[in-house]
Amino acid sequence: MTESQKIRRAGPLTFHGRAIPETTTDQRLLDRRGPAEWVHTDPWRVMRIQSEFVEGFGLLSEVGQAVSVFGSARTQPDSPHYELGETIGGKLAEAGYTVITGGGPGVMEAANRGAQKAGGTSIGLGIELPFEQALNEYIDIGVTFRYFFVRKTMFVKYSQAFVVMPGGFGTLDELFEAITLVQTGKVTRFPVVLVGTEFWGGLRDWIRKNLLEEGLISPGDPDLMHLTDDPDEVVETIRDAHRNLAQMEYAAGEQDGT
Ligand SMILES: CC(C)=CCNc1ncnc2c1ncn2[C@@H]1O[C@H](COP(=O)(O)O)[C@@H](O)[C@H]1O
C-alpha cells in the first residue's frame, strides 16, 4: 500500500495519507504524558461549568419547598445573630421548608444547625475558596461549587424565598441579586425577608432617600424587602406570600380555563 492509499477513520472523520494523525484518539486520551495546558482553556472550562449545572440540578431538583438563608460567614457561635439564625432555621424546618445556605460558618452554620435539629432537611451549597474550608457539620446534603455564578443560580432556582441576616459583601451581593431579579420580573414568587431592623434600617433609609427620591427606582421597590426581628414573622411573611401566589395562580388558571 502506498503512503497516499493509507486511510484512518476516527469517528465521523476520515484521514488519508499524510493527514493521518500520528496517534489515535484513544492513545491521546489515555496517554498522560505531554503538556496539560488544555485543562485551563475556556472550552474545557465550559465543560466543567456545564457539569456543575448538571450536578446541581440533579441534586436539587427533588428538594421540595425551600428557603435560602444568607448572612455573615464571620458571625461567632456566641453571637445573638447566630442564635437568631439557628432559631429561624428551626422554624423554617418546622413549617416544612428545606433550608439552603452557602454551607459555610457563621450564620450559614446557624441556620443549617437549626434546620437539622428541628428534623428538617439542611442543604449547603458551598464555594471553593482560596483557603481551605469545609462545609459546616450541620448539612444533610452538600455540594461545593467552583463557580460563584453556577452556585447562585441554584439558590434562586431551588428556593422560593430568601432570608437575609446581617452580613458583609457576600450577603449584600446575594441580597441585591435577589432584589434585582424580583424587580425585573425574572422571579415572581420570591419574598425577601431581612432580619435585623437595626442592622438593615439604615440601608432601607438610604435606599429611600438616595434611590427613590432621585427616581432611580420605582415607588414600590423599597417594599420588595421586608424587615423584621421576629423569627415567627419571617416564617409567616414567607408563608403568606406563597399562599397569595398560590391563590393568584389558581385565579389565573380559572380565568383561562386551565
Ligand atoms: C471564614 C470565612 C470568611 C469563610 C468563607 N466561607 C464561605 N463559605 C460559604 N459561603 C460563603 C463564604 N463566605 C461568603 N459566602 C457567601 O456569602 C455570604 C456571606 O458573605 P459575607 O460574610 O457576608 O461577606 C453567605 O451567605 C454565603 O453564601
Image (cartoon, rainbow, N blue to C red):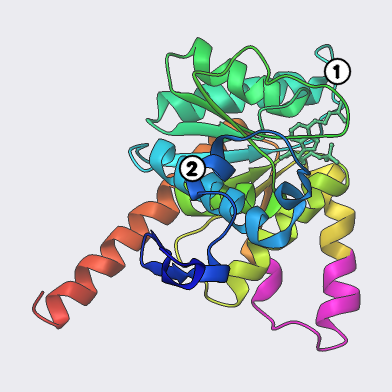
Horizontally, residue 21 falls left or right of residue 247, namely: right
- Label 2 vs label 1: CA separation? 53 Å
Q: Is residue 192 visible?
A: no
Identify which residue is drawn at 57% across, 59% down.
Answer: 21
Dot 2 surroundings within 10 Å: few (below 14), some, or many (20 or more)?
few
User: How many circles with numbers are drawn on the protein?
Assistant: 2
Q: Quadrant of residue 189?
A: bottom left
Give the SS element for disc 1.
Answer: loop
The residue segment tinted magenta is 206-222
Residue type (three-letter) at the residue carrying disc 1: Gln
Residue that carries the numbered disc 1 in the rendered image: 76
**58 over 2 or under it: above or below:** above
Image location (x, y in percent) of residue 29:
55, 41
Q: Residue at x 42, y 39 (%)?
A: 60
The residue at 68%/21% (across/down) is: 135
Q: Which residue is denoted by mark 2 in the rendering?
A: 26
The residue closer to the viewer here, 150 or 167, is 150
**Mark 1 or mark 2, which is nearer the start of the sequence?**
2
What's under tag 2, amino acid-wise? Asp
Q: Position of residue 46 (x, y in %)?
A: 61, 58
